[in-house]
Image (cartoon, grey):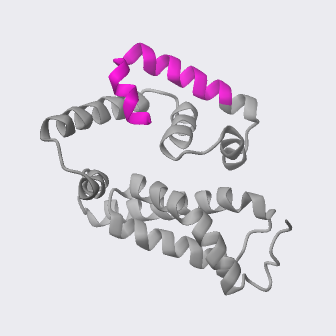
């Protein structure tokens, strides 16, 4: 398919089809960043408003990657605004959504929280490029090709960064900690 005409915007039917296709993943990215389902809803809506008003000049097959970049930037803006206001970041909001769908297991939840904290600490010890590659691949669910496009590096470089990052994480963490990535 061809890219939408950026001067004309996207018609409502096409926007609805793109939203149906991409909204779940865009929302998951936002909620992982913001850890607040309500703010994730707002950011997701803003991303699709931007898509309608100023469609990307990329082929339609790459709209998902474009949306990912937009939502990441919107989330970063929100997080920066929180820091400026001194608003505390709610760390358990994402798990709150999961709790609505199944019965909570307090002991299991505590283990998952500890594993998540250990994983976050280990990810922070990686180089920024390796951390971003792992987060995009396993937490945001992007393919290597999508990561390459989003980061502007070759697919082989992405694969290498993910491999090296997982090797380092495997040295630093107990295997159960890596289950958080899936």
Q: Is residue 116 left or right of residue 76?
A: left
The quadrant of the rendering that contains the C terminus is top left
Would residue 89 be visible to someone looking at this image? Answer: no
Camera-side residue of 75 and 1 = 1
Which quadrant holds residue 2? bottom right
Which quadrant holds residue 4? bottom right
Number of numbered discs visible in the structure rendering: 0
Camera-side residue of 100 and 142 = 100
Would residue 100 be visible to someone looking at this image? Answer: yes
Residue 178 against residue 84 in the figure, above or below: above
- Which residues lie in the magenta part? 159-182
Residue 166 against residue 149 in the figure, above or below: above
* Magenta stretch: includes residue 162: yes
Camera-side residue of 71 and 14 = 14
In the rendering, at what x and y percent does residue 150 appear? 67, 49
Residue 3 against residue 33 in the figure, above or below: below
Which quadrant holds residue 10? bottom right
Question: Going 65% across and 78% down the picture, which residue do you hit?
Answer: 15
């Amino acid at each position: 398919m061809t890219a939408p005409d950026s001067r004309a915007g996207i018609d409502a039917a096409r926007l609805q089809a793109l939203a149906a296709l991409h909204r779940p993943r865009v929302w998951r990215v936002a909620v992982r960043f913001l850890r607040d389902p309500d703010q994730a809803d707002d950011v997701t809506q803003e991303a699709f408003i931007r898509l309608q008003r100023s469609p990307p000049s990329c082929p339609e097959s790459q709209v998902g990657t474009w949306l990912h970049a937009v939502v990441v930037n919107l989330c970063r803006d929100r997080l920066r605004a929180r820091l400026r206001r001194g608003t505390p970041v709610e760390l358990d909001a994402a798990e709150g959504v999961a709790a609505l769908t199944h019965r909570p297991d307090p002991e299991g939840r505590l283990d998952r929280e500890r594993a998540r904290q250990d994983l976050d600490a280990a990810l922070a010890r990686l180089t920024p490029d390796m951390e971003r590659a792992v987060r995009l691949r396993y937490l945001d669910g992007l393919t290597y090709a999508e990561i390459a496009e989003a980061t502007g590096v070759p697919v082989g470089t992405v694969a290498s960064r993910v491999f090296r990052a997982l090797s380092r994480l495997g040295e630093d963490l107990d295997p159960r900690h890596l289950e958080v990535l899936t």
